[in-house]
Amino acid sequence: MKKLFYILILAALAFNCNTTKQTASIDDERLQTLKNNDTVVISSDKTEYEIIIIEPGFNFWVASRARPHGFYSQQYLENRNYQYVIEWNQRVLQPQRYNPNLYELQIDYQPNIDYGYEVNYLLYNYFIYFQMTYNQRLGPWVPRI
């Protein structure tokens, strides 16, 4: 009887360990899919604004390292994005001083337009990703997650 009891306990432990591994592999597959997808379309359901980011690894970075939705207020995101956009556009206009391969196009971001939370959230996270990936500083703040 004792042998049967020990066999049941071992079988239960082995079964529980296997299900955990499957869940981890499903999450890994989802993150790998995001890593392989290089294009991000940022848009808001309430507005007609849209941003398209073609950046290898950005999807994976947002899914794995960025703060969750709702962590920052929309006002916080708008303020930071506006500061980052000003610096970004200044660098685009100075290709002799800043790498033109990093700063290719200007960003038309108006502070008086409500772009919605989703657009501001992903734009802010792109700026953080960009600064950390390419070792750049777009403002007085140290880029961190």
Image (tube, helix red, strand yellow):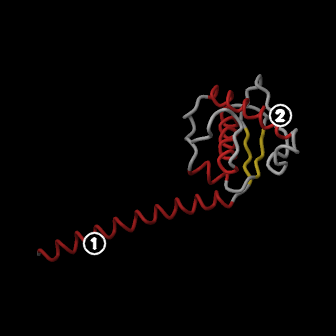
x%, y% of residue 73?
Answer: 59, 28
In the image, what residue occupies the spot 73% across and 53% down? 55
**Residue shown at 70% from the left, 37% from the top:** 119
- Residue at 25% x, 71% y: name it: 10
Please state the horizontal and vertical placement of residue 139, each as a whole percent of the image: 69, 34
Picture coordinates of residue 78, whole percent (x, y): 68, 29
Farthest-out residue, top: 112
Task: Note whether 131 is above or below 71 in the view shown.
Answer: below
Residue 78 against residue 35 in the figure, above or below: above
In the image, what residue type sits under mark 1?
Ala
Q: Amino acid at mark 2?
A: Asp
Residue 145: image tag: none
Q: Earlier in the sequence, mark 1 or mark 2?
A: 1
Helix or strand or loop: what does disc 1 sit on? helix
Q: Is residue 119 left or right of residue 62?
A: right
- Image position of 136 with respect to 21: above or below: above
Which residue occupies the extreme front position in the image? 97
Checking the image for residue 11, the label placed there is 1
Task: Sort mark 1 into few (<14), some (14-19) or many (20+) by Cα contacts within 10 Å.
Answer: few
Quadrant (top left/top right/bottom left/bottom right) for the C terminus: top right
Which residue, given by chain and number where applicable, does mark 2 sit on?
108
Find residue 96 and report its image quarter.
top right
Q: CA distance from mark 1 to mark 2?
A: 61 Å
Secondary structure beneath disc 2? loop
Q: Position of residue 89 (x, y in %)?
A: 82, 36
